[in-house]
Image (cartoon, helix red, strand yellow):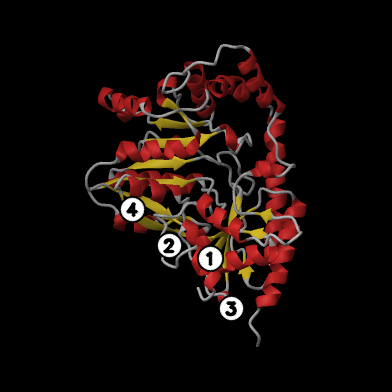
């Protein structure tokens, strides 16, 4: 980075083992010009509650209020979660599986982020390594670093709709590999894996004798040609740790209600020593508020399908607008239209820009000059790309990308 002000904000050698999305977005916010009277538009964080068109269902709100007013849920919950909460999550996830989960398979976590930490903590041992996708949600790399778990990256193939490079997975794995991670629907890519591709992933993992950690925090948020298929469908082929939450589908990320689920009908995770280790680890964790847990059965059972359909409609509409406007700006392109989740990866063509050397500098200057925030691709392991969140109202997306086009015109390389 040539610009001194940018250099002071983020070092050139920032690595994914030290990056957090919130950390970079915080620095970008600090770089916004306080004298710019235009409203700040952030398309950097996957939090749809920032926009009025996205809101949770009334049933969810009433369930939480009733749980509080009942005066029954002011004390500690069991560390693994309330029994009725675990049972409701098991029944909810079992709807899409060829077998039935039980409440014993479900552990309630403080959001999906805590579920990620639990998964990696359970698998860590001296010399172990884990296979992570590139690009990837950066919390996996950060948690691995804290756990002294070696990270090996396999690429997601942009030319194949961000499918897993299974040849790379086979080449990377060895006798110390404990698991591979998949995120479906994809964050940051907005992809959705087909049944056939997930089946190949399961077969590859079985061959390599490793687990699959399936991050399904965006589960069911699919609006392209492929339906969402949970990895747990292949639990009889390979043991699966399913991670998820209410956050995205119910639009309540601040409620911090997630789950860590052993999708394993063959019973590897039901061995007494394994179960005891998981339970003991949960004894040192702080789970979600008891009244939030108590509301879960009603939230799951009484949310009407029309609510989910509306969310899908809004995401499809906003993703189409986002990609169309991106492709009107010469220096950025959207090579793969999103099929799910709330974000898309956008390719940056630096050869068309006069005084910008990488994605981080692009984002810092854009924030300062236009009060628009995107996430640099470096944060998710893909340099000179951008992650753009489209979980926003159409007017905000239109305005953010109109400003981005003005930014390009100002910095375009002179021919």
Q: Secondary structure at mark 1?
A: helix
Determine contact: label 3, label 4, CB under 8 Å: no
* Residue 360 - label: 1
Rendering coords of residue 110 (x, y %): 48, 32
For image coordinates 74% across by 55% down, the residue present is 39
Q: Which residue is mark 3?
A: 355
Distance from Cα at disc 2 to Cα at disc 4: 16 Å
Rendered view: 160 above or below 144: below
Q: Dot 4 surroundings within 10 Å: few (below 14), some, or many (20 or more)?
A: some
Q: Which residue is mark 4?
A: 151
Point out the tag, 2 or 3, that comes first from the N-terminus.
2
The quarter holding residue 165 reads bottom left
Determine contact: label 1, label 3, CB under 8 Å: no
Point out the tag, 2 or 1, that comes first from the N-terminus.
2
In the picture as drawn, the residue positioned furthest to the bottom comes out as 415
* Residue 14 - label: 2
Q: Dot 3 surroundings within 10 Å: few (below 14), some, or many (20 or more)?
A: some
Determine contact: label 2, label 1, CB under 8 Å: yes
């Amino acid at each position: 980075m040539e610009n001194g002000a940018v250099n002071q904000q983020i070092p050139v050698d920032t690595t994914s083992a030290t990056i957090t999305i919130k950390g970079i977005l915080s620095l970008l916010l600090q770089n916004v010009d306080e004298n710019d009277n235009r409203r700040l538009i952030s398309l950097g964080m996957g939090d749809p509650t920032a926009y009025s068109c996205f809101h949770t269902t009334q049933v969810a709100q009433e369930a939480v209020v009733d749980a509080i007013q009942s005066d029954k849920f002011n004390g500690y919950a069991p560390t693994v979660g309330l029994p009725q909460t675990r049972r409701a999550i098991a029944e909810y996830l079992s709807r899409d599986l060829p077998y039935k989960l039980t409440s014993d398979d479900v552990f309630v976590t403080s959001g999906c982020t805590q579920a990620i930490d639990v998964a990696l903590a359970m698998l860590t041992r001296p010399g172990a390594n884990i296979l992570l996708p590139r690009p990837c949600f950066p919390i996996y790399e950060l948690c691995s670093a804290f756990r002294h778990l070696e990270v090996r990256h396999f690429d997601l193939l942009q030319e194949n709709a961000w499918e897993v490079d299974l040849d790379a997975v086979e080449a990377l794995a060895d006798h110390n590999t404990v698991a591979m991670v998949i995120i479906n629907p994809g964050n940051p890519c907005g992809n959705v894996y087909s049944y056939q591709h997930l089946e190949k992933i399961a077969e590859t993992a079985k061959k390599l004798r490793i687990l699959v950690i399936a991050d399904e925090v965006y589960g069911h948020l699919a609006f392209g040609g492929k339906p969402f298929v949970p990895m747990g469908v292949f639990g009889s082929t390979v043991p699966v740790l399913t991670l998820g939450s209410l956050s995205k589908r119910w639009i309540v990320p601040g409620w911090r209600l997630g789950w860590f689920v052993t999708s394993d009908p063959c019973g590897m995770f039901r061995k007494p020593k394994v179960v005891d280790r998981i339970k003991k680890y949960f004894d040192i964790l702080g789970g979600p508020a008891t009244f939030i847990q108590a509301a879960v059965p009603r939230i799951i059972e009484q949310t009407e399908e029309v609510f989910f359909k509306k969310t899908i409609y809004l995401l499809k509409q906003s993703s189409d607008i986002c990609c169309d406007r991106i492709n009107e700006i010469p220096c950025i392109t959207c090579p793969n239209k999103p099929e799910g989740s709330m974000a898309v990866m956008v390719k940056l063509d630096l050869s068309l820009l006069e005084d910008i050397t990488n994605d981080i500098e692009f984002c810092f200057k854009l924030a300062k000059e236009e009060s628009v925030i995107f996430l640099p691709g470096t944060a998710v392991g893909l340099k000179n790309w951008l992650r753009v969140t489209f979980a926003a109202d159409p007017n905000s997306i239109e305005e953010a990308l109109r400003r981005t086009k003005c930014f390009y015109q100002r910095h375009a390389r002179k021919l």
